[in-house]
Amino acid sequence: MSFFKKLKEKLTVSADSVTEKFKEGLSKTRDNFSGKVNDLIARYRKVDEEFFEELEEILIQADVGFDTVMELIDELKMEVKRRKIQDPQEVQSVISEKLVDIYNSGEELSSALNVQQDGLTVILFVGVNGVGKTTTIGKLAHKFKSEGKKVLLAAGDTFRAGAIEQLEVWGDRVGVETIKQAEGSDPAAVMFDAVAAAKSRKADILLCDTAGRLQNKVNLMKELEKVKRVIEREIPGAPHEVLLVLDATTGQNALIQAKTFKEATNVSGIVLSKLDGTAKGGIVLAIRKELNIPVKFVGLGEGMDDLQEFDAEKYVYGLFPEQVEKAEA
């Protein structure tokens, strides 16, 4: 049974609007990556070294990452040899299979959020300015509230002008309270107030914004460490997640940011915003493979419900929907 056929059966069982969101949200990457793969397959009559060289270039252009591409090409060559594949048409299914394998390989990493069943869950958001951090917090607040949870926001970015007001706008839009202090206040003091408010209001979820400074990594590290210490002192084991928000449209620059923040704090997951706005969605694989951090959410559009939990198989479906849909049932 081909990988596309297996994927079709699996997605048919769990067919929902989310699968379609991945298809729509990955249209730019699909046009760039899958379109070029389809053209490559159509031009070659046999799978040879030149075929793999062109495929390698396509993968690199999609921002899959050089190391990941090399591993993927090596695995493809071995699989093609093992299965005695000659027809390039058959390679497409193997490529998809290996993309999922690469994402799921290595240390098992959960894409599910560490939400506490009893008591308060604290989620800390980090990332540079302009990546969509505040929007991500707002959308996640909407998600949790729609699940019936009581949510509070903490305006811990006291450095950037307008950051507090921007978070408040999202809070008002979603219908949740924002705990804040004046611009220029100590972020750790804001977190102390926010945790106290969350406890007194018996909140389920506290979503904490932080300043996005990378210019001075030492200051960033010290500030984040102080914020985390305050939270942990008030709630042992918190923050339960440290989510790094990255702008998918920046490609390899997002990978550089991820490496810096990983050094500065124990990032537990990635939120890849604006995935729908880039033709280089291969960055998902590069992040997972090179940093060993799970992608927990992806932004697939502007709507309130377009922040979706990442799923490697739905991601591959979004890249090759036609092949999956026409696979024999």
Image (tube, rainbow, N blue to C red):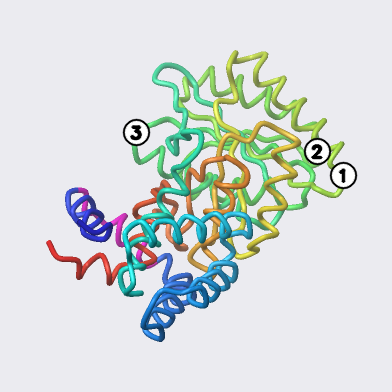
What residue is drawn where x is 63% and y is 63%? 251
Q: Earlier in the sequence, mark 3 or mark 2?
A: 3
The residue labelled by disc 2 is 220
Q: Main secondary structure of the magenta part?
A: helix
Q: What is the x, y in percent for residue 118?
A: 41, 16
Q: CA distance from mark 3 to mark 2?
A: 34 Å
How many dots with numbers? 3
Assess whether mark 1 and mark 2 are in contact (beta carbons under 8 angstroms): yes
Q: Quadrant of residue 84?
A: bottom left
Query: What is the crowding at mark 2: few (fewer than 14 residues within 10 Å), some, or many (at least 20)?
Result: some
The residue labelled by disc 3 is 148
Q: What is the x, y in percent for residue 315?
A: 39, 57
Identity, as a three-letter code, of the amino acid under mark 3: Gly
Q: Is residue 39 magenta?
A: no
Q: CA distance from mark 2 to mark 1?
A: 6 Å
- Residue in the foreground of this view, choosing between 192 and 276: 276
Assess whether mark 2 and mark 3 are in contact (beta carbons under 8 angstroms): no
Which stretch is magenta? 14-24
Query: What is the crowding at mark 1: few (fewer than 14 residues within 10 Å), some, or many (at least 20)?
Result: few
Identity, as a three-letter code, of the amino acid under mark 2: Leu
Label 3 residue SS: loop
- Residue in the foreground of this view, choosing between 323 and 136: 323
Q: Nearer the viewer, mark 3 or mark 1?
A: 1
Label 2 residue SS: helix
Q: What is the x, y in percent for residue 186?
A: 80, 31
Q: Quadrant of residue 38?
A: bottom left
